[in-house]
Amino acid sequence: MAIGLSGVSHAKRVLRHSLSFGREGMSSKTPKGHLAVYVGEEEKKRYMVPISYLNHPLFQDLLNRAEEEFGYHHPMGGLTFPCTEETFIDLVSQLSGL
């Protein structure tokens, strides 16, 4: 399924704002109404996603895959998704376009 550039662009704007919360030297607190997740194959990056995503079937599928891969032990200390950063951004672009 192809994702339009405008959807990816919107998702990156949402995530760019969220990423500032997890960078070194900045506040690492998770803002109210958001959930911190770690994404990436080699280097894990921290993202903040709205908790409203938890109800969406696409996000629930990703949660199920994380459970299959890691169980309830997540190496980063937070919820870790077993996918590439690009896949995650594509998923967020689909969710943010709704």
Image (tube, helix red, strand yellow):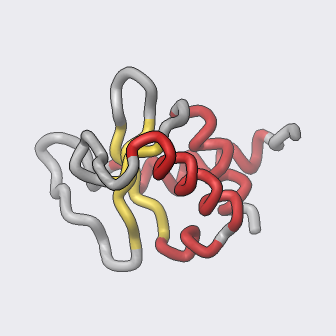
Q: Please name whichever residue, 82 or 20, is drawn nearer the observer in this view of the structure.
A: 82
In the figure, residue 17 lies in which quadrant?
A: bottom left
Q: Position of residue 71 (x, y in %)?
A: 39, 50
Image quarter hosting the C terminus: bottom right
Q: Please name whichever residue, 4 or 65, is drawn nearer the observer in this view of the structure.
A: 65
Say above or below: 97 vs 9.
below
Say above or below: 18 vs 3.
below
Count of numbered badges drawn on the protein? 0
Extreme right residue here?
1
Q: Position of residue 11 (x, y in %)?
A: 61, 51
89 displayed left or right of 24:
right
Residue occupying image coordinates x 44% and y 26%: 41
Q: Please name whichever residue, 19 or 84, is drawn nearer the observer in this view of the structure.
A: 84
Extreme left residue here?
25
In the figure, residue 4 lies in which quadrant?
A: top right
Image quarter hosting the N terminus: top right
Residue occupying image coordinates x 48% and y 69%: 50
In the figure, residue 95 lies in which quadrant?
A: bottom right
Extreme top residue here?
42
Residue occupying image coordinates x 29% and y 49%: 73
Q: Please name whichever residue, 14 or 60, is drawn nearer the observer in this view of the structure.
A: 60
9 displayed left or right of 65:
right
27 displayed left or right of 5:
left
Q: Position of residue 26 (x, y in %)?
A: 16, 50
